[in-house]
Amino acid sequence: MITNKIVSIFTFGIFLIIVGVIAKVINWPQANLLFAIGLVFELLAALLFIWKKIKN
């Protein structure tokens, strides 16, 4: 049902969001970038999942 590619993209997005939040706490300048990239990966995984659901 859910392919490994979608799960991998989702997991990588979660990882980037967590790293972004931790970096934000320690005032790392690139924290917002990591957080934003993590959100993009989450959005991509959601869109791929929805597209596969509609396609079937």
Image: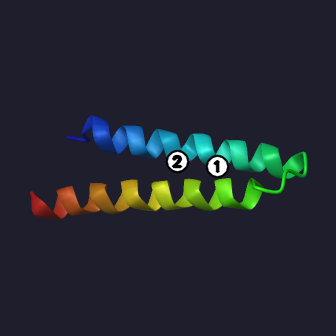
Tell me the crowding category of disc 2: few under 14, some 14 to 19, or many 20 or more residues within 10 angstroms, Cα based: many
Q: Identify which residue, 45 or 28, lies in the foreground.
A: 28
Residue 28's spot in the image, x, y percent? Answer: 85, 50
Residue 48's spot in the image, x, y percent? Answer: 29, 57
| Tag 2 and tag 1, C-beta contact below 8 Å | yes
Q: Is residue 53 left or right of residue 5?
A: left
Residue at x 16% of width, y 64% of height: 54
Q: Is residue 38 left or right of residue 31?
A: left
Point out the residue furthest to the front here.
29
Residue at x 76% of width, y 49% of height: 21
Residue at x 62% of width, y 62% of height: 36
Q: Is residue 43 left or right of residue 47?
A: right
Q: Is residue 19 above or below residue 45?
A: above
Residue 14's spot in the image, x, y percent? Answer: 56, 44
Identified by mark 1, the residue type is Ile
Tell me the crowding category of disc 1: few under 14, some 14 to 19, or many 20 or more residues within 10 angstroms, Cα based: many
**Which quadrant of the structure image shows residue 37?**
bottom right
Q: Is residue 14 left or right of residue 20?
A: left
Residue designated by label 2: 13
Q: Please, what secondary structure does the residue beneath circle 1 have?
A: helix
Residue 38's spot in the image, x, y percent? Answer: 57, 53
Q: Please, what secondary structure does the residue beneath circle 2 have?
A: helix
Gap in angstroms between the C-alphas marked 2 and 1? 6 Å
Which numbered disc covers residue 50? none
Q: Is residue 39 above or below residue 16?
A: below
Residue at x 29% of width, y 55% of height: 49
Identified by mark 2, the residue type is Gly
Which numbered disc covers residue 17? 1
